[in-house]
Each structure stands twice: as C-alpha cells, then as structure tokens.
Image (tube, rainbow, N blue to C red):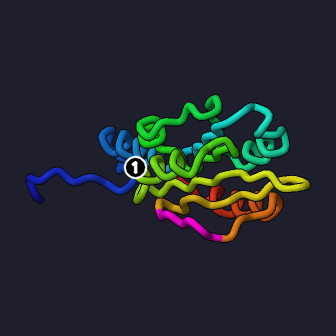
Amino acid sequence: MSAIPQASLASHKLLPASNDLNRLRHNAAALVIPSPKVLLDGRNTSWGAVLQRSLEKIGCEIFLAPTLRLTCEYARKGAYTVILLDSKFSPEQRGQIVSVLVGSNTSMFHVFPVEIGCRWLPVMLSGQECFGSAGFRTKEFFAWMKRTLQGAP
C-alpha cells in the first residue's frame, strides 16, 4: 500500500478555488458592454423628443451641453461615441474639435435644417474626418445610429 494519500472521486468537488471565483466575477463584470455615450450640443429645441427617445431605445447614455459650449478638451475627455452639433457651430469650430478627435473612434454629425426637417451631415465617422460626405435624412440617420450604436463599445 502506498504512503501517498488517495482521494476518491466521490469526495472530490469540482468547484473553482476562491481566487478563481474572484477572477470569474471580474471577467463577468468586464463583459458588460457600456452604453454608447452621445453628446448633444446645441439649443434644447434642436434636439426633439423623437431623437432623444430613439437614442434611449438604442440604449444610449445622453449628455446635453448648451449651445457652443463644447470645447476640444471636453470632447476628448468625454470619450463620446457620437457627438451631435446643432447648426450654430461654424466650420472652424467643428474643425478644431475634429483635430483633437481624429483616431478616437468618435463619430460626429452636424445637423443642417432644410425646408421640412433636417439633414445630418457627417463630420467624422469612427475617428476619421469625412468632410464632404453625403448627409443623411432623419430616417436614414436613425437607421445608421441604431445599426452602429447597438454594437458600439
């Protein structure tokens, strides 16, 4: 008979050690996908209830900033998924914000009023400047937001 203690399979438990349990809990917490952060900068009247409800349905965390209060530093530190600017922003102001966000994976749109409704003009898509790209009608914009943000980190 051997002097080495033997364990029977019946008494052996297959539970992870406490360190393993902590690691599993930590990994499970890391799997939680944060809500996309959307910053709306402009007059409160620029951002209708339909837009805000649509963003909430997608699961976005919405931040409001007063007209023209968005600074380059604020945009960079906020790590927003999408930034929506109202029509008061000048091309120079948009360009300054784009310059600090290039490569950040942020998308930015400028709302441009038209006869009935508005056009959503992309300024930056996923951290890449896209000046001159075709704009979206509101319905197309909502479809883009839903498709893009539901998989966004």
Identified at 65% across, 52% down, the residue is: 110
Task: Kindly identify which residue carries mark 1.
Answer: 100
Farthest residue to the left: give it.
3
Identified at 56% across, 65% down, the residue is: 131
Q: Could you tell me if residue 32 is visible in this image?
A: no
Closer to us: 69 or 147:
69
Name the spot of residue 70 as percent of width and height, x first.
53, 36
For the N terminus, give its image quadrant.
bottom left
Closer to us: 51 or 130:
130
Q: Quadrant of residue 68?
A: top right
Q: Could you tell me if residue 56 is visible in this image?
A: yes
Total tally of numbered discs in the picture = 1
Magenta stretch, residue numbers: 128-133
Q: Is residue 130 left or right of residue 138?
A: left
- Regarding mark 1 in the picture, which secondary structure is present there? helix
Q: Quadrant of residue 40?
A: top right
Q: Is residue 60 left or right of residue 93?
A: right
Magenta span dominant secondary structure = loop
Q: Compared to 111, does 62 lie above or below?
A: above
Name the spot of residue 33 as percent of width and height, x first.
54, 49
Name the spot of residue 119 as percent of width and height, x first.
77, 58
Q: Residues within 10 Å of mark 1 (few under 14, many from 20)?
A: some
Q: Is residue 143 left or right of residue 50?
A: left
Decide whether residue 78 is among the magenta residues: no
Name the spot of residue 22 as percent of width and height, x first.
36, 39
Identified at 30% across, 40% down, the residue is: 19
